[in-house]
Image: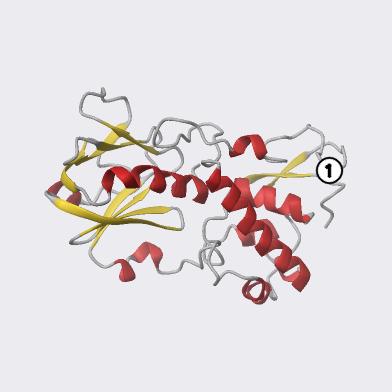
Amino acid sequence: MPELPEVETAKNGISPYLKGFFIEKIIVRQPKLRWEVSPELAQISHQKVTALSRRAKYLIIHTETGFIIGHLGMSGSVRIVTDKDPIEKHDHLDIVMNNGKIMRYNDPRRFGAWLWTDNLDEFHLFANLGPEPLSDEFNANYLFQKSRKKSTALKSFLMDNSVVVGVGNIYANEVLFYCELHPEKPAGKITKTQAILLTDTIKVELTRAIQQGGTTLKDFLQPDGKPGYFAQELQIYGKKGARCPKCGHKIESLVIGQRNSYICPNCQKK
């Protein structure tokens, strides 16, 4: 599914076509997504887009009267088109701008969401979210203290949005490999030195992924239709049976928290 770098890439890709322009209308073809599309969206007309931002894996379109909040779900994507582009299967929502551009949302599995709020500070889905991983608030001291007395598997701990947002399955696998930490290691057993290494590596890996437009595995495309190129940089994710790029041992897989995990049993010992 699209993770933080993919959502950041989507935000950066659509921003030049939305920010500063006016929404003429929003066309909702399929309201039944993960949650029902907010009925307020179909009522929007001649609303200026003042900014775009991201919180965790949520895309936020700021308007003069409130906020459109999008989530790409498992297979969703946004692209910039015009009214001459044919409507494709699974094109569920259009944000029609006054500059001749349309932000079109496609979602084959319909696990995404498009919601409205007039108060971002009180938006219910943001209430229990942890800090952004690229912020100063997310640091080694924070992670170390948060992990104390936690018996949770380290990989599950890093993917817990109440701990830190946006470290999804792909990047959690990669980070733990670079840090030579076993994903099943109890989070409470990490040392302060390991907490420093983890926070630094998370920031580096997510930044690199954003710079390369995210990771394309099955569904993700950038808003211009191009794939993300970070998949070429993946060291371990999805590579069961391949040789570890560090030591040559065969990469193995296991399931943690109902998600596939990949490890080098030689480099990543418990």
**Crowd around label 1: few <14 · some 14–19 · many ≥20 (10 Å):** few
Give left or right: position of 137 versus 189: left
Give left or right: position of 144 versus 61: right
* Observer-nearest of 224 and 69: 224
Give left or right: position of 189 versus 133: right
Q: Where in the figure is residue 158, as x and y percent of width and height?
A: 62, 60
Q: Quadrant of the C terminus?
A: bottom right
Which residue occupies 54% across, 46% down? 211
**Residue holding disc 1:** 246
Q: How many marks?
A: 1
Which residue occupies 74% across, 35% down? 240
Q: How is the image coloured?
A: secondary structure
Element carrying mark 1: loop
Q: In the figure, 34 relative to 149: above or below?
A: above
Which residue occupies 62% across, 49% down? 171
Which residue occupies 63% across, 62% down? 157
Q: Where in the figure is residue 206, as x and y percent of width and height?
A: 58, 52
Q: Which quadrant of the view contains residue 155? A: bottom right
Identify the amino acid type marked 1.
Lys
Q: Which quadrant of the view contains residue 27? A: top left
